[in-house]
């Protein structure tokens, strides 16, 4: 076994723990939402918020670190699939820091102050919507890492774009309906 294999293994393990753990919590929230179980949905969101800085952020940073080590020593940074992976990571990291974290903190403060209110649930719905988009980006990152598309892989690139577009539609198209029903 060589160093590249060890670093690649660590990269895959940290990515699996990061993406898989978050996806499991997302599914719990989604199932609770579909069942009309507000308490279950809030518990899944609370767990996500609690694990954000303690688990998801470190796992995502380790994933990035091991990926950068592989690129720096063995793979390089010029291949399209590397650039797509880095752009995807930056996107999902930004969603976590700019949407999930502040929204979860705001929702927790609202619930602590006033209990479970429609306003708090609305913030929770925005978190779920953003998660739909975030996981479409993560799915593209996973496909990117496995398929390693080049500029000539039009079908793969088109499929990846379609997944992101579908995730955006599921995430933000639902918000339009939410806004329309509130008006």
Image (tube, helix red, strand yellow):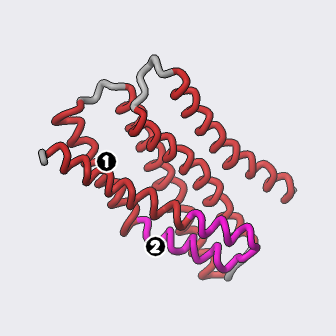
* Crowdedness near tag 2: few (<14), some (14–19) or many (≥20) residues, C-alpha within 10 Å: some
Looking at the rendered structure, the secondary structure element under dot 1 is helix
Q: Residue at x 49, y 47 (%)?
A: 138
The circle drawn on residue 64 is 1
Could you tell me which residue is drawn at 24 percent across and 36 percent down?
Answer: 71
Count of number-bearing discs: 2
Above or below residue 119? Residue 150 is above
Q: Residues within 10 Å of mark 1 (few under 14, many from 20)?
A: some
101 vs 15, left or right, is: right
Q: Position of residue 19 (x, y in %)?
A: 44, 56
Numbered tag placed on residue 46 in the rendering: none
Q: Tell me the quadrant of the picture where the C terminus can be found.
A: bottom right
Magenta-colored stretch includes residue 78:
no
Q: Residue furthest top?
A: 152
Above or below: residue 104 compared with residue 73: below
Above or below, comparing residue 33 to residue 145 in the picture: below
Label 2 vs label 1, nearer the camera: 1
Within the image, what quadrant is residue 89 found in?
Answer: top left
Q: Is residue 45 magenta?
A: yes
Q: Residue at x 67, y 82 (%)?
A: 115
In percent of width and height, residue 141 lies at 45, 41
Say which label, 2 or 1, has the lower sequence index: 2
Majority secondary structure in the magenta region = helix
Q: Which mark is residue 50?
A: 2
Q: Position of residue 144 (x, y in %)?
A: 43, 36
Magenta span of residues: 26-52
Alpha carbon distance from label 2 to label 1: 21 Å
């Amino acid at each position: 076994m060589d160093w590249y294999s060890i670093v690649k293994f660590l990269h895959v393990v940290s990515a699996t723990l990061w993406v898989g753990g978050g996806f499991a919590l997302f599914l719990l929230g989604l199932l609770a939402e579909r069942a009309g179980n507000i308490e279950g949905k809030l518990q899944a969101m609370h767990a996500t918020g609690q694990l954000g800085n303690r688990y998801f952020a470190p796992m995502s940073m380790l994933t990035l670190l091991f990926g950068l080590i592989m690129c720096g020593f063995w793979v390089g940074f010029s291949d399209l699939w590397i650039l797509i992976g880095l752009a995807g990571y930056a996107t999902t990291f930004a969603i976590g820091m700019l949407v999930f974290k502040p929204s979860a903190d705001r929702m927790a403060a609202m619930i602590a102050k006033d209990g479970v209110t429609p306003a708090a649930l609305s913030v929770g719905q925005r978190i779920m919507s953003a998660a739909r988009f975030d996981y479409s980006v993560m799915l593209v990152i996973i496909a990117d890492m496995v398929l390693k598309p080049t500029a000539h892989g039009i079908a793969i690139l088109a499929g990846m774009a379609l997944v992101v577009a579908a995730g955006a539609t599921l995430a933000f198209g639902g918000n339009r309906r939410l806004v329309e029903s509130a008006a």
